Image: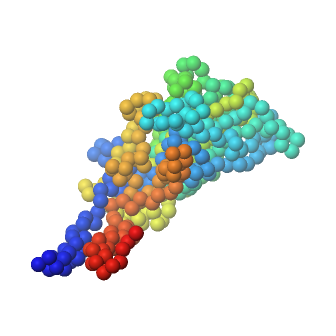
Amino acid sequence: MVSFWKSLRLPVLLLSLLRLPSRVDAACECGYSVNSTSDLEYAVFTDLLESDFTKIKNFKDDTDWQPQVWELDPKRALGPYGRATRLEAIIPNPALNISLNSRGIYGGHAGLNLIVPRNYTVINGEKYLIGAELDSARNDMFYGTFRVGYRTTKWPGTCFGFYWYHDDSQEIDTELLSREINSTHTVLNLVLHTKIGGSNLLALPGTFLVAGIPYNSTAEIHELRFDWTSDAITWYHDGVQVWTISNTTLFPAEPGHLVITHWSNGDPLWSGGPPEGDAALLLTYVKAYFNSSNPQRQLDFKSRCSSPPPSKDDKICEIPTQTGPPLYDSEDPPYFFSNDRERNATFNQTVYEDIKKSEAERITIPIRETGSVWAPAAQCSVVLWMVFLVFMPMVGGSGVRFV
């Protein structure tokens, strides 16, 4: 009788495999929405880029971003000094333990520092000011909501830029000048470069706004944000709407990428400077949710979801809106879909996370999320493992041992 039941073990287990669920919960496989899809006004974006700079120990490991190295002589830089970007101006300060507090390993708040040194550098006999620039590796961004957690330098004489860029005539820009910050206010320079007006702001009224916000942005972390849809381009600060452009004839017509810069050229009419101290712009995160211009990404999305979404069956996650300055040493720190393992919130996205190699070392590696459909290799591995469990007692009984 025992041998009879043993003979049934394999077909019973294989039958049970057929009953395993072919889908797991992929919370956001049909995109990420600004506002709830039940609201009168909302936008859904298919792709994401999330960078939590409080956790990065070696910025070269973060392949979402491409640090830039280039030079502009004083004439082309339009100032008394030339401009040069260097890798050495990008300094990570990861948190000792982000789950406990936001203190970095070098002291101060954790994050990524973009440095403009106070001293000029001589290159080919001319004076240059060193700065930093980060460009996103993704250059297929068309429509989206783009957000950065930041704290400006206390030293006057630098320019901080956060913008979407295709070329000089298709650019959505936000710039802060540290000389325009005081104890109670910060000035935002908001601009839409257009094909009609190009980079000449005076050529097209209505594409440039100087907005004052009631914060000293050198004192704590804040969030800059701009949303670009087919209907409007809107800028926000800490979740509060600052300005909207609704003239769609001015909007970009081609895909682009994100850029973050911190620089100075000594121009008294713009950046000012050089700064009197080593000026550090602190970045704590970038969150970008956007549509891809890549035809394959578009086809992948249409195969999973209704077009245009949403239908009642589409799984869409609402993007949390930052209201007020981002808080780190609290019970409600900034949220990242890519850190939310329980929700499986990054289906069909490429995300990057820390993998522990030892007690003293972590590396960042790309992980392709399999999401709601089992990967064929994973299914095959499960089947082979189950078959192995069935046959192992039989093989072991004939004298073969596994060590």
User: Would residue 160 be found to the left or right of residue 29 on screen?
Assistant: right
The location of residue 208, given as percent across then percent down, is 58, 36
Q: Would residue 381 be found to the left or right of residue 246 on screen?
A: left
Instruction: Say whether residue 369 is left or right of residue 183.
Output: left
The residue closer to the viewer here, 353 or 127, is 353
Q: Which residue is pictured at 51% across the width and 52% down the height?
A: 357
| Quadrant of the image occupied by residue 127 | top right
State the quadrant of the N terminus: bottom left
Q: Is residue 361 above or below residue 333?
A: below
Q: Identify which residue is drawn at 37% across, 50% down.
A: 341
Above/below status of 269 relative to 365: above
Q: Quadrant of residue 86?
A: top right
Residue extending farthest to the right is 125
Residue 112 visible to the viewer:
yes
Identify which residue is drawn at 46% across, 66% down: 296
Question: Which of these two is toward me, 225 or 211?
Answer: 225
Whether residue 213 is situated above or below residue 27 in the rendered picture: above
- Residue depicted at x 50% and y 62%: 294
Q: Is residue 13 left or right of residue 266?
A: left
Residue 337: % across, % down: 40, 47
Residue 206 vs residue 165, the one in the foreground:
165
**Quick one: which residue is furthest to the left in this view?**
1
Across and down, in percent, residue 39 comes to 30, 43
Kindly tell me whether residue 212 is visible in this rendering.
no
Q: Quadrant of the C terminus?
A: bottom left
